[in-house]
Amino acid sequence: MLNITNTFEDGIARCALEGRLDTVTAPELERELRDAIDDATELVLDMEKLDYISSAGLRVLLAAQKAMTGKDGKMKLTGVGDIIMEIFDTTGFSEILTIE
């Protein structure tokens, strides 16, 4: 299960993720991000309460990164915990994504 909380202010879309980002929940996040990206100049994903991310979730993050870069926008991840960071390091995503 994945809970997504969205806010939008001054061109910045913020999405707080809680739970598991996997094959079942990735399509939901993909839909949410598609809508957020349309109007945003910056996308911030708060991962403080994210417990797990699968390859399907990584694919969604990569697609969002490409979409934001394609429109000269920015994307960053915040609150990344040790478990998720280890996945990013192992897959090389820590080199691709902006993590604060």
Image: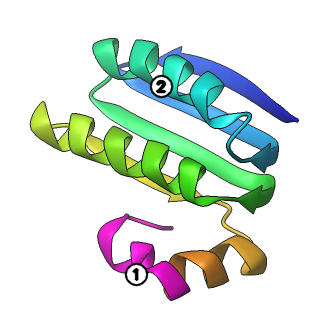
Numbered tag placed on residue 15 in the rendering: none
Position of residue 88 in the picture relative to residue 59 (left or right):
right
Q: Which residues are magenta?
A: 90-100
Disc 2 from disc 1: Cα separation: 22 Å
> Residue 70 at what x, y percent from top left?
11, 37
At label 2, counting other C-alpha atoms closer than 10 Å, the crowd grade (few under 14, some 14-19, many 20 or more) is many
Of 83 and 59, nearer the camera is 59
| Residue drawn 43% across the image and 12% down it | 35
**Three-letter code for the amino acid on which mark 2 is drawn:** Leu
| Residue drawn 64% across the image and 23% down it | 28
> Residue 49 at what x, y percent from top left?
83, 52
**Residue position marked by numbered label 2 in the rendering:** 33
Of the 4 image quadrants, the one containing the N terminus is top right
**Three-letter code for the amino acid on which mark 1 is drawn:** Gly
Of 23 and 40, nearer the camera is 23
Q: Secondary structure at mark 2?
A: helix
**Residue position marked by numbered label 1 in the rendering:** 92
Where is residue 85, by image quadrant?
A: bottom right
Q: Secondary structure at mark 1?
A: loop
> Residue 60 at what x, y percent from top left?
47, 42
Of 31 and 48, nearer the camera is 31
Of 25 and 47, nearer the camera is 25
Position of residue 75 in the picture relative to residue 72 (left or right):
right
